[in-house]
Image (tube, rainbow, N blue to C red):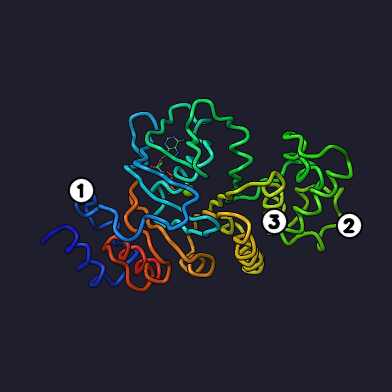
């Protein structure tokens, strides 16, 4: 029996589907069975990744990854923990540059620009490609100063009035202005978790990004705060391209029309979220989805 068939049989037979990864010898999976299936291209690409490999020292964390992400698309990245989702996100704004032994190979273009071009200004790239993390991480500064931080560094405002306007607009776009406008001088860290996360989103928006990367942005939040962020993601997709890592099998279909499934550093399958969840083409995708739902 091929390893793919064996896997499928285990998925079908398993009572406790969560244990699939414990019982299957993944080292046996051959190249053929981890070839990407589904549609990895986009009709209107904003981000184009070609043959991307990422290493931490000797260890390879992303293997031969190719994917296009469309303008104003929301794409969910799913997969077991340790499969390289965060590593991939960090390649998109060169956050991996800050990790000593990390090496990136291949080509990544955002809006036609090769972001690994030696001449590229990494500071402006990180403004263009904002990131929101798992644990909300506002600066220990006022709410106003959190949002004004980026615009000040990038000199986006000529005077205080302009800066006020950027802060207000960013908080509005983060669905937060009405709730917070009378508390701008309070510390960002005094807010609730969900409010802190919306503040972090406003902070990312304040420097006019094109892309927003979100790494499990709701995993530390309660269901109400999660619903607010999910609603916000939907609204934000009118202005930004959004790449979101999620652990929640319920969240991916709520926020995104397209999903990519990662497994051990490889892109296994990409396609419409509904198809990935109802008719996955690859047995590894199916194993993950049914295990997580089971
Ligand atoms: P995920 O976000 O899907 O859980 P990660 O991208 O964090 O996965 O990790 C992918 C692989 O790379 C894992 O094996 C992890 O241990 C390894 N890794 C992640 N960050 C580092 C690092 N800074 N140094 C060395 N190895 C790392
Ligand atoms: Mg991660």
Q: Ligand 1, what quadrant?
A: top left
Q: CA distance from mark 3 to mark 1?
A: 42 Å
Q: Relative to residue 220, is residue 32 drawn left or right?
A: left
Callout 3: 10 Å neighbours few (<14), some, many (20+)? many
Q: Relative to residue 103, is residue 225 drawn left or right?
A: right
Dot 3: element: helix
Residue of label 3? 198
For the point 41% across and 30% down, the residue is 103
Callout 2: 10 Å neighbours few (<14), some, many (20+)? few
Label 2 vs 1, first from the N-terminus: 1
Label 3 vs 1, first from the N-terminus: 1
Considering the image in quadrants, where does the N terminus appear? bottom left
The answer as to whether callout 1 falls within 8 Å of ligand 1 is: no
Dot 2: element: helix
97 and 70: which one is in front? Answer: 70
Residue of label 2? 182
Q: Quadrant of residue 24?
A: bottom left
């Amino acid at each position: 029996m091929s390893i793919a068939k064996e896997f499928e049989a285990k998925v079908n037979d398993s009572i406790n589907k969560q244990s699939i990864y414990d019982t299957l010898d993944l080292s046996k999976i051959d190249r053929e069975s981890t070839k990407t299936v589904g549609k990895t291209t986009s009709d209107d690409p904003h981000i184009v990744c070609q043959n991307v490999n990422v290493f931490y020292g000797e260890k390879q964390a992303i293997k031969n990854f190719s994917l296009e992400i469309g303008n104003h698309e929301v794409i969910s990245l799913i997969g077991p923990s340790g499969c390289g989702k965060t590593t991939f996100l960090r390649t998109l704004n060169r956050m991996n540059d800050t990790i000593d032994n990390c090496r990136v190979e291949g080509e990544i273009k955002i809006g036609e620009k090769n972001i690994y071009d030696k001449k590229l200004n990494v500071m402006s790239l990180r403004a263009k490609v904002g990131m929101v993390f798992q644990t909300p991480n506002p600066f220990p500064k006022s709410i106003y100063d959190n949002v004004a931080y980026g615009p000040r560094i990038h000199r986006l405002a000529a005077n205080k009035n302009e800066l006020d306007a950027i802060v207000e607009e960013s908080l509005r776009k983060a669905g937060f202005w009405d709730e917070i406008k009378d508390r701008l001088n309070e510390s960002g860290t005094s807010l609730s978790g969900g409010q802190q996360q919306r503040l972090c989103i406003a902070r990312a928006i304040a420097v006019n990004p094109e892309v927003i990367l979100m790494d499990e942005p709701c995993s530390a939040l309660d269901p109400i705060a999660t619903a607010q962020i999910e609603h916000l993601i939907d609204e934000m997709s009118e202005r930004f391209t959004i790449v979101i890592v999620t652990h929640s099998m319920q969240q991916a279909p709520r926020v995104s029309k397209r999903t990519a499934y990662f497994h051990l550093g490889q892109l296994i399958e990409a396609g419409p979220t509904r198809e990935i969840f109802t008719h996955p083409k690859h047995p590894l995708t199916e194993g993950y989805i049914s295990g997580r739902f089971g």
